[in-house]
Image (spheres, coloured by chain):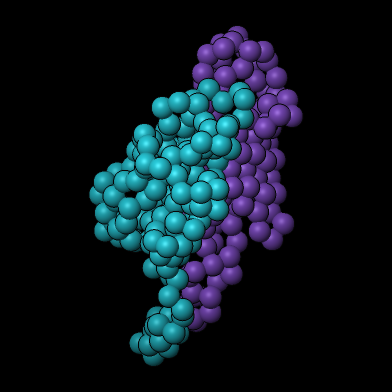
Chain colours: A cyan, B purple
Amino acid sequence: MKRREFIVAASVFAALPEAQASDEAMRAAIRAWAGGEPPPGLLKIDIAELVENGNAVPVRVAAHEPVAGLALFTPLNPEPEVVHVTLGAASARPEFSTRMRLARSQRIVAVAQTADGRCWQAGVDVIVTLAACVEP
Amino acid sequence: MATRAVITLPAAIKAGVAFEVRATVAHAMETGYRTSDAGARLPRDIVRRFECRLDGDIVFAADLFAAISANPYLAFWLRAAQSGELSFSWRGDNGFEHRETRPLTIA
């Protein structure tokens, strides 16, 4: 890329509205999914504490009792939602694994919901050295 | 270009015993927050919904957002009492749709 092109591209990037959710946006997304503010509870979130590349971070969320739904949220990605999971009757374990993007170091939050509507949440801190969404 | 999906099931599944299902589909999962070299914003193009059904009943479903990595991967555990058919579907932006079926054979 030529220097002039870079300057033009960089200035356009700087003019974009800041794409970042906030803690408040995440709380709102959690309330929308859970139907209320879930109390803290027991949930296992397996994710590397120190992530070198935020583009594909393996993450596993597991509950200690049968649940109907699990969801993952982030406060500092462009959007607070990551994934909403629904578990059917043939589900054998209340858990799922996926790979997620992390825009920066933050505390990710998992929420569980049982079939009778009871909800609880847990969080884990993750440090990211190379963030997602910044490379062209 | 034909979409590729990879679904991994154990070689032998026993009745009533939990087994893991892993499903990946080839998709760029363009977030809508990146810009091209020319500075234009790349429009969002992601997979929005994944469903796994056993003989027509949903056993696992997921609503995906931009924070899921490219080539979305999901792993989950199922239990079945009898043989059947597992069907997988991915739907997303710009009319993206992909389906796969796998026989579920109880040994």
B53 to the left or right of B42: right
- Up the image or down, A1 lies above or below B19; here it is below
Horizontal and vertical percent position of residue A66:
50, 26
Q: Quadrant of residue A90?
A: top right
Vertical comparison of B11 with A105: above or below: above
- Residue name at image x 64 percent, y 39 percent: B51
> Quarter-wise, where is residue B106 in the image?
top right
Q: Nearer the viewer, residue A51 or A30?
A: A30
Q: Is residue B5 visible?
A: no
Residue that extends furthest to the right in the rendered view of this protein: B56
Looking at the picture, how far across and down is residue A54, in whole percent?
36, 55
Query: Count the marks: how many?
Result: 0
Q: As rendered, which of A60 and A51 lies closer to the eye?
A: A60
Q: Residue at x 58, y 65 (%)?
A: B44
Tell me residue B104's x, y (percent). 65, 20
At 68% from the left and 26% from the top, the residue drawn is: B54
Q: Is residue B88 visible?
A: yes
Q: Is residue A21 left or right of residue B82?
A: left
Can you say which quadrant of the picture contains the C terminus of chain B?
Answer: top right
- x, y (%) of residue A52? 28, 53
Return the residue nearer the eye: A51 or B12: A51
Q: Quadrant for residue B9, please give it.
A: top right
